[in-house]
Structure formats: C-alpha cells, structure tokens
Image (spheres, rainbow, N blue to C red):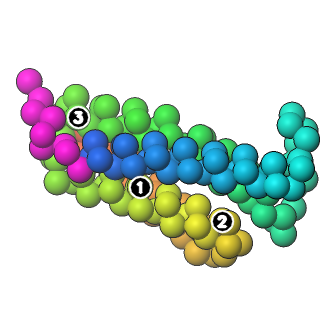
C-alpha cells in the first residue's frame, strides 16, 4: 500500500498546476472579451498579439497536462522515490508557471528553455516510476 503522505509535494504541485490552468483560462478569456474577439473564431496567428500568446499558453498546458497526471499516477502507483517525484513535480509546476509568464511577455528563448525544463521533469517522474517498477 502506497503512503500518499510521502508525495505531499507532488499532490501540491498537481493542485497548483490546476490553479495555473484556471488562471491561464481566465487570462485568455478576459483578453478575448476586452479585445472584443468573437467567440468561436480562431485567434490570428501572430506572436505580436497578446491574445494569441495567452491563447497558446492555455492550449499548450492542455497539451501536456495529461502526461503530467499519468506520470504522477504511474510513479505513485509504483511507489517511486518520493524525493525524486516531489522534486520533479514541483519543477514541472514552476517551469510551467514561468513558461506562461514568458509566453505572455513574448520572451521566446527563455520560454523555450522553461518548456525544456518541464519536459525533463516529466521524463524524470517517469524514470523514477520505471526504476521502482523493476
């Protein structure tokens, strides 16, 4: 039986990531309302447009959240090293939060580096799960 208390930071990162997603959705929606963007119409592909960047930020986390959740579930089910999983999960959240900020501010190079960090965090969580499985 897995003791979930050892993964308290992982579960915190999960909750914080959910809140981050809510904030990103609200930012994209409020910007669309302020800019009077008609609902249901695509946003113009233009990185100079804050609404585009806010929309992409929201869509981008939606593209990776399932991987984050599945990775955490796998690692916890395998009773992976909690220190590794906790650290990687918090790293994922911090990288995703800073990634969003960089996307809003159009800081392309830093945004890409933070995306890479979040990707490495996902890989680390999975590796910890597989090590525990073997």
Q: Which residue is mark 1?
A: 93
Query: Going 76% across and 55% down the picture, which residue do you hit?
Result: 31
Q: Which residue is mark 3?
A: 76
Q: Which residue is mark 2?
A: 103
Secondary-structure class at tag 2: helix
Query: Going 31% across and 32% down the picture, which residue do you hit?
Result: 73
Give the camera-side residue of 99 and 112.
Answer: 99
In this picture, residue 108 sits left or right of residue 100? right
Q: Nearer the viewer, mark 3 or mark 2?
A: 2
Q: Quadrant of residue 50?
A: bottom right
Q: CA distance from mark 3 to mark 1?
A: 17 Å
* Viewport quadrant of the N terminus: top left
Above or below, 113 relative to 27: below
Query: Going 58% across and 67% down the picture, which residue do you hit?
Result: 101
Above or below, 129 relative to 17: above
Q: Position of residue 99 (x, y in %)?
A: 55, 64
Above or below, 24 relative to 76: below
Q: Residue 30: tell me if it is visible.
A: yes
Q: Nearer the viewer, mark 3 or mark 1?
A: 1
Q: Position of residue 133 (x, y in %)?
A: 20, 32
Going from the N terminus, do you reach mark 3 or mark 2 first?
Answer: 3
Secondary-structure class at tag 3: helix
Going from the N terminus, do you reach mark 1 or mark 2 first?
Answer: 1
Going from the N terminus, do you reach mark 3 or mark 1 first?
Answer: 3
Chain part drawn in magenta:
1-9
* Viewport quadrant of the C terminus: top left
Q: How many numbered marks does the figure carry?
A: 3
Q: Main secondary structure of the magenta part?
A: helix
């Amino acid at each position: 039986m897995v003791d979930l208390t050892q993964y308290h930071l992982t579960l915190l990162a999960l909750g914080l990531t959910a809140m981050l997603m809510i904030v990103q959705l609200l930012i994209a929606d409020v910007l669309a309302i302020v800019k009077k963007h008609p609902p249901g119409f695509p946003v113009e592909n233009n990185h100079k447009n804050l609404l585009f960047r806010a929309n992409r930020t929201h869509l981008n986390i939606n593209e990776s959240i399932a991987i984050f959740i599945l990775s955490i579930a796998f690692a916890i089910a395998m009773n992976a090293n909690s220190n590794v999983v906790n650290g990687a999960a918090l790293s994922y959240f911090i990288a995703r939060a800073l990634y969003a900020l960089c996307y809003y501010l159009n800081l392309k190079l830093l945004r890409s580096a933070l995306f890479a960090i979040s990707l490495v965090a996902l890989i680390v969580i999975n590796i910890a799960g597989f090590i525990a499985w073997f």
